[in-house]
Image (tube, grey):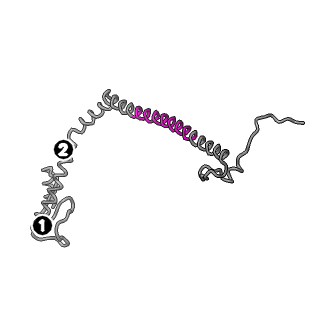
Amino acid sequence: MAKLKEDQRVKKADLAVLITINKPDGLETFTYRDGVWLTSWQFVIPLAFALRFNLISLHHERVSGQGKDEKKEILYQYLIGIEFKHRVEAIVEAFSNLQDDLEREKRWFSAKWGRQEKEIRKVLDHTHGMYGDLQGIIGRSLPEIKTLELSEESQTEIVVESTEPETVA
């Protein structure tokens, strides 16, 4: 195994595989010992598939790492450059515009709802007033409309305030 490891160093190989006819004790399929893959002839193909997958992954990692320093420099230049600054400013501007639009819509809807609420209040007040007028004219023969009648509780809660100054005798 020492000779195989030395050959691996000389060849600068990523993997070393030792195929043996006489399996060592405890070896069922294949194993990795001291930086060397160890197997018997009957497990060469399964080990080869596994190692092939490993080598392909390793190759992809190396390829993606090539030019890493150049990519870092390009990325750094982009981040400190005017193009990046303009892009970030455009994003912030777009968000600010959206927020301004949202605030305008909130104010508009708030005003609209306020106007509608006043109109609804007017309709209800006039309806109650008309019902009261009719009660005064027709009397108890006017059919009772429960939603327009004042309940006993609300009649006792009504407090009449005088706007005339009190005179002390």
If the image is split into quadrants, where does the N terminus sit? Answer: bottom left
Q: Residue at x 65, y 45 (%)?
A: 132
Q: Are marks 2 and 1 in contact (CB under 8 Å)?
A: no
**Position above or below: 28 against 161:** below
Tell me which amino acid carries mark 2. Answer: Val
If the image is split into quadrants, where does the C terminus sit? Answer: top right
**Nearest to N terminus: mark 2 or mark 1:** 1
Tally of numbered discs? 2
- Estimate the x, y position of residue 92 in percent, counting from the top left: 39, 32
Cα–Cα span, label 2 and label 1? 30 Å
- Does 116 appear in magenta? yes
- Does 141 appear in magenta? no
**Magenta stretch in the rendered image:** 95-121
Q: Main secondary structure of the magenta part?
A: helix
Q: Residues within 10 Å of mark 2 (few under 14, many from 20)?
A: few
- Please name whichever residue, 69 or 165, is drawn nearer the observer in this view of the structure: 165
Q: Image quarter for residue 70?
A: top left
Q: In the rendered image, which residue does mark 1 sit on?
A: 43
In-image side of 117 versus 59 (left or right): right
**Position above or below: 154 against 77:** below
- Estimate the x, y position of residue 161 in percent, counting from the top left: 75, 40
- Please name whichever residue, 168 or 83, is drawn nearer the observer in this view of the structure: 168
- Secondary structure at badge 1 equals helix
Question: Which label sits on residue 63?
Answer: 2
- Estimate the x, y position of residue 166 in percent, counting from the top left: 83, 36
Q: Residue at x 21, y 44 (%)?
A: 64
In-image side of 123 versus 93 (left or right): right
Q: Residue furthest bottom?
A: 25
Tell me which amino acid carries mark 1. Answer: Phe
